[in-house]
Image (tube, rainbow, N blue to C red):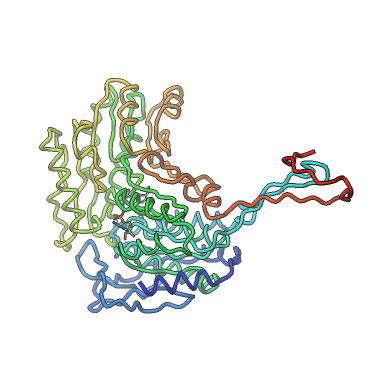
Amino acid sequence: MLPLKFSIQRARNLKALKPSIFALRSSYYFSTGVVEPSSSLRSPPRVPNLIGGKFVDSQSSSTIDVINPATQEVVSQLPDIDKLAMNITTEQGKTLKDAHGDVFRGLEVVEHACGMATLQMGEYVPNVANGIDTFSIREPLGVCAGICPFNFPAMIPLWMFPVAVTCGNTFVLKPSEKDPGASIILAELAMEAGLPNGVLNIVHGTNDVVNAICDDDDIRAISFVGSNTAGMHIYSRASAKGKRVQSNMGAKNHAIVLPDANTDATLNALVAAGFGAAGQRCMALSTVVFVGDSHSWENKLVELAKSLKVNAGTEPDVDLGPVISKQAKERVCKLIQSGVESGARLLLDGRNIVVPGYKDGNFIGPTILSGVTADMDCYKEEIFGPVLLCMKADSFEEAIHIVNRNKYGNGSSLFTASGAAARKFQTEIEAGQVGINVPIPVPLPFFSFTGSKASFAGDLNFYGKAGVNFYTQIKTITQQWKDLPGGSGVSLAMPTSQ
Ligand code: NAD
């Protein structure tokens, strides 16, 4: 726990700083070239903490191995390369192209945060009463913290610390223990770009470190992204300590397909959003509700999914890599089996896939279950693997009802050629991020990431205006500048504006 304590102290001792947003901007232009994977390393380096601007070895005698999901080899306990995308692929398993997307979507937030001067502008009303002006300003909170999941090792840290530090806060980042390397590389780049020492700090670990972050009196706000189990625990523990918490959690995103939709474009979108990143995206489309005749498109869907190439993320032309761990693979396979046992039809089974050269990898091929119903475990639980569930509805209304009954509300998409249907959908659907002929409707950072229902706890979302509000405290100032009349006596009545 010592590194955490030091890093919080260091962060607290700094006066709230306004790092140069122009310096930060230059971090946008780094390259993510390809180098040899570090998976063959015999004795992997230890991932250091970052405290007060120095990378320091942890004092802990225990370590957590970072495992390459394609080979089971210990990649590193921190990579010593500067190649972000390759690091993501070797630690997380996603394809290199997808890893570049991971970085790119995060850099969009950095770019947005570069406009912080205008984003955090307050409000001013002159002469609200005779000689009195009122204005509001947004001030930094102090020390903020972020706790990250494994599935976007670059994008999710970049949802957090660039916004927090440009608002004037210091930050303690706890990356996922499964793929911490990208956070370290990002921190190096931020410091190279001019971020003052101690503004961004990184601590590694699991539950104990997270609990210490929740309990620490100096930390004022926590950003969390991950599962519901961890997210609700952190939300209640940290809120009980009076902290602000924004908690982005699990999902079960549905697509509704109407028969008038463009068949090929819709099927391409379903396959990309269902199986991309091996289904390990919180905005993956994991359930399709076919309305009426569109149900007959299932066969074509299977053919398209069969054509996808499963391999290690570093291989050329690969579509999906392995899932993050052996335990994750076991869990996904168990949920597929439970679907079969409760009556779903397995149209495509990826469980026994063999990937030449990577016999130990956690690979699961694209899997499609049809005839899924809302009472099945495979439907009720987030699978977080390359598994697409197909349901059927007789009418558009029934399909909307199915989606709205689901407890999650991260995202939902409609595929149609009808403007009237699209308008009905955007009005009636109970999900925080809505796509119309767009499979993964993650907004650009001038909007916010607006998951709802069980997919989010808190009331200020990540990035966008809400993100700025989350990391700042509003202060409202009322000032009077006029020649004050003397001799009018003391009035104890409630002051009114006149
Ligand atoms: P996870 O909850 O297992 O881990 C996330 C973080 O919480 C890690 O840093 C981990 O160390 C910590 N943690 C885990 N269990 C904890 C506990 N009991 N107490 C304290 N800390 C704990 O999540 P994951 O497997 O890394 O990520 C996958 C999940 O994240 C999925 O549910 C996915 O939907 C979700 N996710 C959501 C979003 C979103 O924006 N809604 C984005 C990405 C991922």
Which residue is depicted at the point 86% across and 50% down? 482
Q: Residue at x 55, y 52 (%)?
A: 468
Asked whether 181 or 312 is in front, the reply is 181
Q: Quadrant of residue 55?
A: bottom left
Which residue occupies the foreground of this view, 97 or 109?
A: 109
Q: Is residue 350 left or right of residue 136?
A: left
Residue 158 coordinates in the image, percent (x, y): 46, 59
- The number of numbered badges drawn on the structure is 0
* Residue 57 image-quadrant placement: bottom left
Tell which quarter ligand 1 is in: bottom left
**Where is residue 435, by image quadrant?**
top left
Q: Is residue 62 above or below residue 411?
A: below
For the point 33% across and 52% down, which residue is it? 233
Q: Is residue 145 left or right of residue 265?
A: right
Q: Nearer the viewer, residue 238 or 160?
A: 238
Q: Nearer the viewer, residue 77 or 70?
A: 77
> Horizontal and vertical percent for residue 417?
41, 26
261 relative to 495, above or below: above
Where residue 484 appears, x then y in whole percent?
87, 50
Of the 4 image quadrants, the one containing the C terminus is: top right
